[in-house]
Image (cartoon, rainbow, N blue to C red):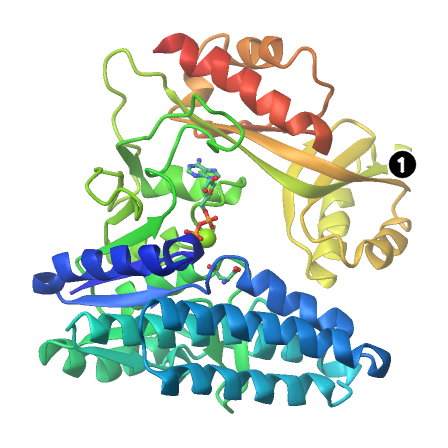
Amino acid sequence: MIVCKFGGTSIGDAPAVRRLAGIVQSRLAERPLVVLSALSGVTNALLGLLKHTAPSEQRTLAHQLAELVARHRQLARALELSEELGERIADEGQQLLARLAARPDPAGADELCDFVAAQGELWSTRLVAAALAAANLESVWVDARSVMRTDAHFTRAAPDRAVLGDLAPRQFLPLLERGKVPVTQGYIGATADGRTTTLGRGGSDYSAALLAAALHAERVEIWTDVDGLMTADPRLVPAARVLPVASHLEAAELAAFGAQVLHPATQAPLVEARIPCVVLNSFAPERPGTTILAGVRPAPVGAGESPVRSISCKRGITVLNVRSPASRGSTGFLRALFAIFEQHGIAVDVIATSEVNVSVSVEDSSRIEALRQDLERLGDVSVFPHRAIVAVVGIGLRGIKGLAGRIFTAVQSVNVEVISQGASEINVTFVVREEDAGEAVRRLHAALIEAVA
Ligand code: ADP
Ligand code: ASP
Ligand code: MG
């Protein structure tokens, strides 16, 4: 069997859903399991509803929710699906409104957030399952919460792979064996006691990979709105090119440093199960896309190809600088520093150290103040918000003579703030101001990728 995951833009309107049905039809012999995101923009809109739960805002809340229901019903109509489906979508909208209007308990804010966000995938899968049925495909709608068991870490729940490995085959294999096309939600899961969770934003790719591993799939197809994994985000760099092949390791690095096209956790279950992944464009299904090879070895660099494979950036980063003259020569300082990050449950991205200074970048800025207070026990702390990490990802980068020089010549006009010293085999990263990130990516792409072609 194979897993076909479609992102939001691949379900955005009726022509997109018809294309999706054509793609699924063309894969029937391989027994596809269809995993879906919400329609594009819907998750953001649903999460936006949470700002209007105060009694004085009930009208705004009802109005915004009605717009979302209308968008889904219009799509159902454009696809000539049954009126019953439209009514079901409206009913679920009413239930959501009731839950939102019931003066949410602040302690359960994250839980409510997931309950609300999950509706996007629940609606999109109902629509697509019905559209596939209308195209004479024997689709079966499956609630992912019946298999995707997670912990109760709402908004970024961790899946229980053992439970999934038990439940998913029992749920899906009999359907696939009978020639059915199961359609299920990415991104969402549930705790053992049945409370809805999500795997974090962009998590549908991760769901697809987890399901593929649990079902020993032959391949995962990630259908999106670009031609594959590219040398940079084409929205930032119009000259970006598709990478025909990449390794799991490269794909994971790219995703970790901001290539939105794949959720950062997607590769891990695939590496273990040695399942290849293909990133494809649902707007141009005949194009070859990017094949991400099973295994962790970097894809070989062809003659005339640049060992620098891509440039990515991640915005919304905060840099913390801890200055502690007393740390000079002291062995326990870094351990004490990282213990504080660990206590706050905040993951660290880029690290740079000098004799008396440690700079650390973090993605999660929601709890910075509490973190800062604790870090002050170790030294003077400065906080720099609105930063971006720029990453040059490639193969054997450490061995390339003069690469650092070329990188920093390329971004001369941009103020580079933190340089990660331990440049790995596979990436070189640094921090810039958010507003400089686009410029830095374009310049690096021109100097390290376009210039070599
Ligand atoms: P989906 O809804 O299909 O999950 P996303 O919006 O999450 O799609 O991801 C696709 C987008 O990722 C593309 O439209 C592209 O702008 C962006 N992107 C960022 N970096 C890259 C990259 N290196 N290669 C391809 N796309 C990228
Ligand atoms: N719909 C979810 C989001 O927008 C999950 C996904 O698209 O992968 O984050
Ligand atoms: Mg995505």
Q: Position of residue 309 (x, y in %)?
A: 39, 25
Per the image, label 1 sits on a secondary structure element best described as: helix
> The residue under label 1 is which amino acid type?
Ala
Residue 95 position (above or below residue 351): below
Does residue 118 appear in the picture of this structure?
A: no
Residue 222 position (above or below residue 427): below
Does residue 38 appear in the picture of this structure?
A: yes
Residue 176 position (above or below residue 344): below
Q: Residue at x 27, y 64 (%)?
A: 212
Residue linked to disc 1 = 326
User: Which residue is nearer to you in this view: 437 or 394?
Assistant: 437
User: Which residue is nearer to you in this view: 356 or 194?
Assistant: 194
Q: Is residue 271 left or right of residue 353?
A: left
**Residue 285 found in image quarter:** top left
Q: Residue at x 41, y 28 (%)?
A: 231
Q: Is residue 171 left or right of residue 264?
A: left
**Residue 53 found in image quarter:** bottom right
Q: Position of residue 118 (x, y in %)?
A: 52, 74
Q: Is residue 103 left or right of residue 114?
A: right
